[in-house]
Every structure is written in C-alpha cells, then in structure tokens.
Amino acid sequence: MHAYNRLPSSGQSSPQSPPSSPVSRSPRYRHRGSKSGRPPPKSLAQRLAWIILSFLLKRQGIFLFAPLLYIAGMLFYMGTVSFDVGPVIKHTLRRNPPGSVYRSPQLYAKLRPEMDSDNSSADAISTIWKHSYKVGEWRPCINKSSDGLPESNGYIFVEANGGLNQQRTSICNAVAVAGYLNATLVIPNFHFHSIWRDPSKFGEIYDEEFFVKTLENDVRIVKTVPGYIMERFDYNMSNVYNFRIKAMSSIRYYTDTVLPKLLEEKIIRISPFANRLSFDAPPAVQRLRCLANYQALRFSDPISSLGEVLVARMKSFSSNNSGKYISVHLRFEEDMVAFSCCVYDGGENEKLDMDAARERGWKGKFTKRGRVIRPGAIRLNGKCPLTPLEVGLMLRGMGFDRSTSIFLASGKIYDSERYMAPLLEMFPLLQTKEMLASAEELAPFQNYSSRMAAIDYTVCLHSEVFVTTQGGNFPQFLLGHRRYFYGGHSRTIRPDKRKLALLFDNLNIG
C-alpha cells in the first residue's frame, strides 16, 4: 500500500479528502455496531475534538507557527519577558532565602542584653589562637646586590594609577621590570584619579632619597630624564612612545616586545601601569619586587612621624592588654557601598544616595539598558561590605570583650553617626586616627586620601591582630608586610562573609 499524499502534485488537483476505505463501504460492516442500522451518536467532546482536528488538517500552515506560539505562551506564563529599559533591582515577593537580607540590627537588638551583662575579662587577644606556631621563624630571603650595574639600555617612565596601594603595586612592578631589562627607572609619576582625588607626588608620600639609595646596586633610578634625550621629543613626555600593556603580562612579554623598542628609542613610556606584570614571575623578578616593597619604600618623614606617634598612643590606650590592640580595616565608605549594589536598612534615603554616588563615580556603568541587579544574591555570595555593626558582632562572637582596644582604619564611613553607634557600644575603647590625633596634627594630610591611608597603614602594621573585612590592595599589602615584619607569624582575621551572611540572618542564635 502506498502512503497517501495530501499535497497536490504539479498539474493535478488534490481531492478534498482521502477516499473511503473499501471496508467501510461494504454493507457487511456498515451497520455492525448498531441494531438500528445507524452509527451510535458521538458525545459533545468527541464532536468538538473532530471539528478542531478537521480545521487543523485543512489549515496545515498553522503547524509552522505552533512551536512559536507555544514558546511565547510559556514565556508570558512564567513571567520572564521584561520590557524594562533601565537597570532593575529585583525584589521577589517570595520568601527571601536565608542570608539574602540585611537583618543584623534585629540580631543585635536580641543579643545586646546578653552582651551588656557580660562581665568577663578574658584576654582574648592572647587566648583566641589555641595553637601557637612552633615550627620556626620565617626569614626574608631578600639580598641586596653588591655588584656594579652594566650600562643602561634606556629609560622607563611609568604612570602609576589608582589609590595608595595600587600605586605601590605599580612602583614595585616598575622596579622589577627596570631591573630585569637593565633599564633606568624614572621616579614614577602618580596619575590623578577622579575617585581618590589626591594630587600627591612620589616624594610627598615616600622617602625619595631613601628609595634611590636602597636600590642603587640593583636598579638605576633618576628623578628626571636627561635633556639630550627629551630634546628629541620637544621636551614633552606625551610625545614619547607609549606601550599599552595588557594586565598581568608575563616578564617574557617585556623582554620580547618592550626591550627591542627600548633599545631603539632609548626611552619608553608605560601608562597606565597598575597590575601590568604577572604575579607568576621568576625568582629574580620577585626578589626585586620584595626589595622595593619591604625595604626601599618607606613613608616620608611627616607621615612616618605622625604614624609612630599614633602607634605609641594606641599602645598607651591598650595598657590593660599589655599594649596590644586590634586593627580593623573597614570598607564602608559611600563609594564602596554604592559600587557593591548591596541594600542595607536605610530605606529610600539610602537608595537615593547610592544612585547618586554610582552616577558620580561610574557614570552609565549601572544604568545600562536591561541590567538586572540582585542585592540578595550579592549578599549570599559574600560580596557585601560588612557594616560597623557586623564587624562588632563578629568580634564579640569570637570572644573579644568591651575591654579590647581597637584601631579602625577607614575612610569616611557612610552615614557614620547611625552605623558607627552600635560598634562603639560594643567596643567603647575604639579609636580612629581622627580620634587619636589633634586637628592640628592631621591638618597637613586632611585633603590627601593617599597620605591619610598611609597613616592608617602604619598603625595597622604594628597591631597585634589585623582584621580585614573586604579585600583589596590595602589588606593584601598589609598581610605580606606583617608576615615580613613578624617573621611569618602575624595574626590575621579574614572572615568568610558567605557564612557570616547566614549567621547574621539567624535570629535564633545567642
């Protein structure tokens, strides 16, 4: 039997319906199912199904659109089609997953009576580490070179961008690259940034003479490029060939690509230079990095002097703990909170503040068409900056009591009067550089964010315990510097913010 083709062939007409089966035409079978000689009546559902099927068979083109109609119907049913043209902050009406909402104030209200009644005087700074490190002391493996330097291959001029510690990264990398390429490094130029807004020069933050002297047998360093070279470029550094180097480039890229140009031009410019050298580098490069960071880079005399005064004052305030204090690096400035896109408990005022801050600092980045921001998911992923209250809850939970002395390193806290109040209630001996120093002492540094950060860095470096809350260049440099400073055994607290988000959302703990 051949399959019946419902489509008309060329030059022939198609019947309206297939011919009836010979069996159905036979008188023998026509009346078999009915005593009256007629077929049994069909139900309403059967007749409706037959009408729809007949319509579809006669309109076979509809099958081409059936899948599209099905998918469109499912999308509209599930509510995944969005016609928003701006950024959307998703707030689901369903029950929020544990840890996705900021409920720390409610937890503090529940735990505060218990905290206030705690009269224990345990020395948590000395007892919180149950097992002391007894394997041995780590010793720095940085050795200064005593050999003379060969003739220079040319001059390298770099532009260090970012804040204090991002610029510090650039300086260390520039020393390593210049030394490896046997080049002369020009004192790095600091790029003025719209966020940090600090016009400070190298010598206003670091001891320039000490920097050059410390590295004299490893890398040639000069303050300016000789006039006979700059004459070729009309004494304009912007006319010098500029390398646009990718982030985290290998040292081999510098030897294969940068060095030939350096030999040809005798001077090159690299701008910007932050994070332009891979962390994975040979020992000779790492030695130069460490030499620059831990020995050559010393803060300028005004910064070092005030920093040492504040360290002495902190130890004096911590006499009940044998001069030991905790330092906390808190990142809860307005720009940090805005960039995180996290939602706290400030309501409509907070939303307006954060929208304005995002537009000022990152114009257009957060207002792209169709961008969806999910604050709950960000919090669950441990990406939200800890509030002062949450830092206090964590430290009290670890066993630090009201008698613990804390130095808080931070920029201007967002809505500080409201957010700092609970932390000061939990730790009344807390100090900041603004509290330790007089207005007259801070006046020369007040409008310079990098110099103020350098003072914080100094006081944190000499603390018994360092607490980092958000990551970034500041804590990373401090972690390494403290290990170098304390023979590898500095005490550091790095919280798991994913777990903290769940704990702070649990009102049953106590």
Image (cartoon, rainbow, N blue to C red):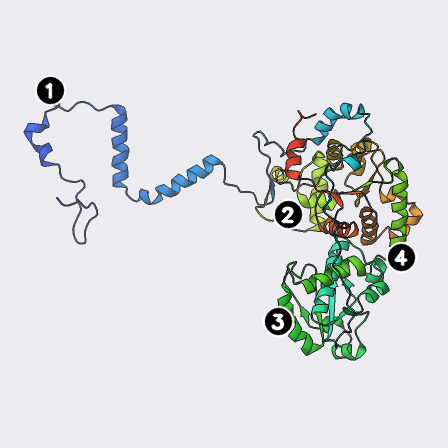
Depth-wise, is mark 2 or mark 4 nearer the camera? Answer: 4
Reply above or below: 445 against 184. Answer: above
SS at badge 4: helix
Tell me if I can see residue 191 in this picture.
Answer: no
N-term-proximal mark, 3 vs 4: 3
Query: Gap in Å between the C-alphas at discs 3 and 1?
Result: 100 Å
Q: Quadrant of residue 144?
A: bottom right
Query: Gap in Å between the C-alphas at discs 1 and 4?
Result: 117 Å
Amino acid type shown at disc 4? Asp
Q: Would you call the spot at circle 2 few (<14 residues within 10 Å), some (14-19), or many (20 or more)?
A: some
**Residue that mark 4 sits on:** 301
Determine which of the numbered discs, if any, sits on residue 366 in the image. Answer: 2
Seen as rendered, the residue at the extreme right is: 440
Reply above or below: 264 against 185. Answer: below
Q: Would you call the spot at circle 1 few (<14 residues within 10 Å), some (14-19), or many (20 or more)?
A: few
N-term-proximal mark, 2 vs 1: 1
**Contact between labelled residues 4 and 3, with CB atoms less than 8 Å apart:** no
Amino acid type shown at disc 2? Phe
N-term-proximal mark, 2 vs 4: 4
**Residue that mark 3 sits on:** 256
Q: Would you call the spot at circle 3 few (<14 residues within 10 Å), some (14-19), or many (20 or more)?
A: few
Q: Quadrant of residue 42?
A: top left
Front residue of this view, candidates 59 and 441: 441
Please identify the quadrant where the N terminus is shown. top left
**Contact between labelled residues 4 and 1, with CB atoms less than 8 Å apart:** no
Reply above or below: 380 against 202. Answer: above
N-term-proximal mark, 2 vs 3: 3
Query: Gap in Å between the C-alphas at discs 2 and 3?
Result: 39 Å
Q: Would you call the spot at circle 4 few (<14 residues within 10 Å), some (14-19), or many (20 or more)?
A: few
Depth-wise, is mark 2 or mark 3 nearer the camera? Answer: 3
Report the side of 252 relative to 361 (left or right): left
**Residue that mark 1 sits on:** 36
